[in-house]
Image (spheres, helix red, strand yellow):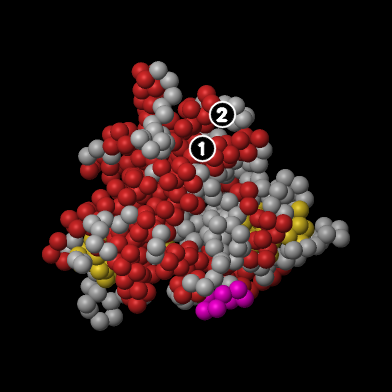
Amino acid sequence: MAVSLAAVLILIPTLVVSLLYLLSGKKPSNNGKRRLPPSPPGLPFLGHIHFLGSLPHRGLGSLAAKHGPVLLIRLGRVPTVLVSSAVAAEEVMKSRDLAFASRPRVVMAERLLYGRDVAFAPYGDYWRQTRRICAVHLLSPRRILSFRRVREEEAAALVERVRTGAGAGAVVDLSELLIAYANYVVSRAAFGDDSARGLYEGDDRGRELRKVFAEFDVLLGTTPLGELLPGMGWVDSVRGLEGKARRTFEALDGMVEKVIEDHRRRRRQAGGRQMRDDADGNDHRDFVDVLLDVNETDKDAGVRLGTVEIKAIILDMFAGGTSTTTTAMEWTMAELITHPRAMRKLQDEIRAAVGGADHVTEDHVDKVGYLKAVVKETLRLHPPVPLLVPREPPADAEILGHHVPARTQVVINSWAIGRDPATWERPDEFWPERFLDSSVDFRGQDFELVPFGAGRRGCPGIGFAMATLEMAIASLLHRFDWEPAGGNMPGTLLDMSEVNGIAVRIKGGLPLVAKAWFP
């Protein structure tokens, strides 16, 4: 969905000509008796691309605030229905969920995920079976609990990295540490301790791998201009998009291929399946071993998982479990830093729950109700993926009485829904207390809060992501008092500017001062 500002600026000559025709923009046809959604005036050739700007969720949010919650816009040659209210989102993701369960073709996902992943796959047998494999075998509550040790160990390691970097009042780049934490957790869950340790062995190697994953996230959130505007593929070439995609794919493909082959070799040496149960019968297999086992034991899988399918699913886990989780952790810390009263209240609850223990555990986290409220409020204001992955009805459909022609892209603006003044009191204010006596949650049943989507295409990894996030936030707030760099100077504020990608992150990162706290 993201189109860079530089790419749009290249089209200035076209914009100048198009502006001459702005007032002659035609109203959309009513397609006989069927009523299409309203459509604001656009530009010839470009359609409504110019409304995207550098932060499309905000540009499209402003468009919806002016023209309505269900709009028909045109992104170049791509007709798109923009959904920006809870009522309309509920119709798409619940009442008519099956009609809108498919996906449009996403070029970058095909390039980077082999066209065999789960998140971007069109609705059909392959998607249904691989989605079930992920939900049952990889991301079930039991499987998530099996990685509790990983989360607790990596959270303790995160605290130690902060302690090491925060000596003598030094500024800590918390964003980089959170990225590393999320990568370590997902890598250990996906590949196992030994393989993950080998991937990140050495600081330089770890930084290089995180850089590759960062490029992967940016590319997944990038729509080649040539896909929107016929004849403009040369702009993508000038930007070097093809080269970046090729290099990133080759780096990730080689890494995952090696890990899978290592697992297969160990399995051959061990004589078959890897049942890594501990003394209590807990299953500690990593994702790769689970996927290799599915073919041998799950007769209902209905799909053969070859190397390509396993690689695609594993990279889906990284896309959903690193960038989006890191983004949510960043925004949570940023909001707490800029609202010190809320931070102190949360710290008091965490420290009371932990008591005299050396480290935070998930048992402690479960006792801190205010943490849940803070996370919900952060996800309301800053959904990691503010424009949910597009949907596409294969046949004609309807949204709130508006006709949606087959193969029209449908985009849900979860950012605009979370800030809708018709739904939320003080919608732009960080106020976690609103959730203390509220049953509203983000798991797909309450459509005024949909940071992870809902229905058939809702994110199956919510439980894994939230466990990872809460463990890190609780650990950081337990052991340290935080303030922005230069926080003792009057008027010093944390820069909350956004930068677009598959996840919308804090542009300047989190340069913070951490002061150790001792009970």
Callouts 2 and 1 close, C-beta under 8 Å: yes
- Give the answer, above or below, for where 205 lies relative to 262: below
State the mark number for residue 377. none
Magenta stretch, residue numbers: 421-427
- Relative image position of residue 468 (x, y in whole percent): 39, 52
Measured Cα–Cα span from mark 2 to mark 1: 10 Å
Q: Secondary structure at mark 2?
A: loop
Q: Amino acid at mark 2?
A: Asp
Residue at 54% x, 71% y: name it: 438
Q: Quadrant of the C terminus?
A: bottom left
Residue at the far right: name it: 33
Residue found at x 71% / y 48% = 98
In the rendered image, which residue does mark 2 sit on?
298
Q: Quadrant of residue 261?
A: top left
421 displayed left or right of 24: left
Q: Nearer the viewer, residue 105 or 181?
A: 181
Residue 176 visible in the current orientation: no
- In percent of width and height, residue 43 lies at 64, 62
